[in-house]
């Protein structure tokens, strides 16, 4: 007696992709489903390699070497990398990394990060080789890049940012132009290595997030006054501030920024501290989401009830807004 041969039923690729997309934040399950069949492999691989962070944990130099070996075996993997972050959280490896120079020019990113929000992790730009600095700057100037985050970066010349009109989001936290020995902001020398594509009032509009980087922010605003600059941060549509690290330089920088951007910003956010690591022992409490109303300007606070050290910073932030923006233009809420 013979039985008919059972044929395998292939699921529609759209269905497989939808299932894998629903698992995008679960790396363990993604690794498992990628082994089911070739039909599941390509989509799961895209999610697994979409976000790469070197320097957060483990041995970043060894992780980078393994990544390059995988890319050598499967060159298509490099196209999956869209969010890439490098940091010195696990030791100062950036200054001595030769393989990073091999990888960076091959990347086409949407999001790029240098450094991470951390209480004790810094990237000292001056310790990086000139070749690595240029490679990092080239990624920043990539027209495909939409989001740039700089966390805990010291001695970085932010002049190059003034031509990054392609960015939709710029995040700067604990970014320092230099050693602080001079209060005079140096003028950028144009042209840089990229010709400006947009000028005037329409040069840039996007999201700007700044934390404890008064001197860098002042320098960036100074550079924006140059006719060759294309990142007009005074045209930001969304502005987020943190009371952490709010000193005299931040007060001066934000006051100047508010004078320039009050007519363009439609969303303001003030937070006590966006990162619990910044203050050791801090506990983040749940935030309250109140009823939504249709308003011209959205103004919100995020705060941590168990932290009292930043009350003075919150007061200074509010003081800066009070002096520059009429309160009648805002409806206050907590998010």
Image (tube, rainbow, N blue to C red):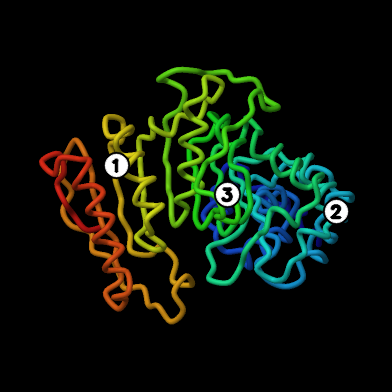
| Residue 320: x %, y % from top left | 26, 49
Secondary structure, mark 1, is: strand
Secondary structure, mark 2, is: helix
Q: Nearer the viewer, mark 1 or mark 3?
A: 3
Marks 1/2: CA–CA distance: 41 Å
Considering depth in this image, is 203 or 206 the residue closer to the camera? 203
Residue matched to label 1: 267
The residue that appears at 58% across and 29% down in the rendered structure is 163
* Depicted 203 relative to depicted 295: above or below: above
Q: Which mark is residue 335?
A: none
* Depicted 301 relative to depicted 12: above or below: below
| Residue 222: x %, y % from top left | 48, 34
Residue matched to label 3: 177
Q: Is residue 220 left or right of residue 313?
A: right
Image quarter hosting the N terminus? bottom right
Considering depth in this image, is 196 or 40 the residue closer to the camera? 196
Image quarter hosting the C terminus? bottom left
Considering depth in this image, is 86 or 35 the residue closer to the camera? 86
Answer with mark 3 or mark 2, whichever residue precedes in sequence. 2
| Tag 1–tag 2 contact (CB < 8 Å) | no
Q: Which mark is residue 99?
A: 2
Q: Is residue 327 left or right of residue 138?
A: left
The residue that appears at 40% across and 20% down in the rendered structure is 201
For this orientation, the residue located farthest to the bottom is 281
């Amino acid at each position: 007696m013979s039985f008919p041969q059972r044929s395998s039923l292939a699921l529609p690729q759209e269905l497989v992709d939808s299932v894998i997309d629903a698992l995008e934040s679960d790396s363990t399950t993604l690794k498992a489903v990628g082994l089911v069949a070739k039909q599941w492999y390509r989509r799961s691989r895209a999610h697994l390699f979409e976000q790469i962070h070197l320097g957060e944990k483990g041995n970043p130099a060894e992780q980078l070497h393994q990544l390059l070996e995988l890319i050598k075996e499967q060159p298509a993997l490099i196209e999956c990398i869209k969010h890439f972050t490098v940091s010195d959280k696990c030791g100062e490896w950036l200054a001595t990394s030769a393989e990073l120079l091999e990888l960076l020019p091959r990347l086409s990113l949407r999001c790029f990060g240098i450094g991470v929000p951390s209480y004790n992790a810094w990237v000292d730009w001056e310790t990086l080789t000139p070749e690595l600095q240029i490679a990092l700057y080239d990624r920043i100037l990539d027209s495909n890049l939409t989001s740039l985050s700089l966390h805990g970066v010291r001695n970085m010349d932010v002049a190059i940012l003034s031509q990054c009109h392609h960015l939709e989001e710029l995040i700067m936290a604990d970014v320092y132009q230099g050693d602080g020995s001079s209060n005079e902001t140096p003028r950028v020398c144009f042209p840089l290595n990229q010709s400006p594509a947009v000028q005037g009032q329409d040069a840039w509009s996007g999201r700007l997030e700044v934390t404890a980087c008064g001197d860098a922010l002042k320098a960036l605003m100074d550079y924006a006054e140059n006719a060759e600059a294309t990142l007009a941060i005074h045209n930001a549509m969304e502005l987020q501030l943190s009371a952490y690290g709010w000193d005299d330089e931040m007060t001066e920088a934000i006051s100047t920024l508010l004078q320039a951007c009050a007519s363009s910003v439609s969303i303001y956010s003030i937070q006590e501290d966006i990162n619990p690591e910044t203050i050791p022992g801090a506990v983040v409490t749940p935030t309250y989401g109140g009823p939504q109303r249709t308003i011209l300007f959205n103004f919100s606070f995020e705060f941590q009830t168990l932290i009292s050290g930043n009350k003075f910073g919150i007061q200074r932030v509010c003081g800066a807004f009070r002096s520059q923006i009429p309160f009648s233009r805002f409806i206050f809420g907590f998010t």
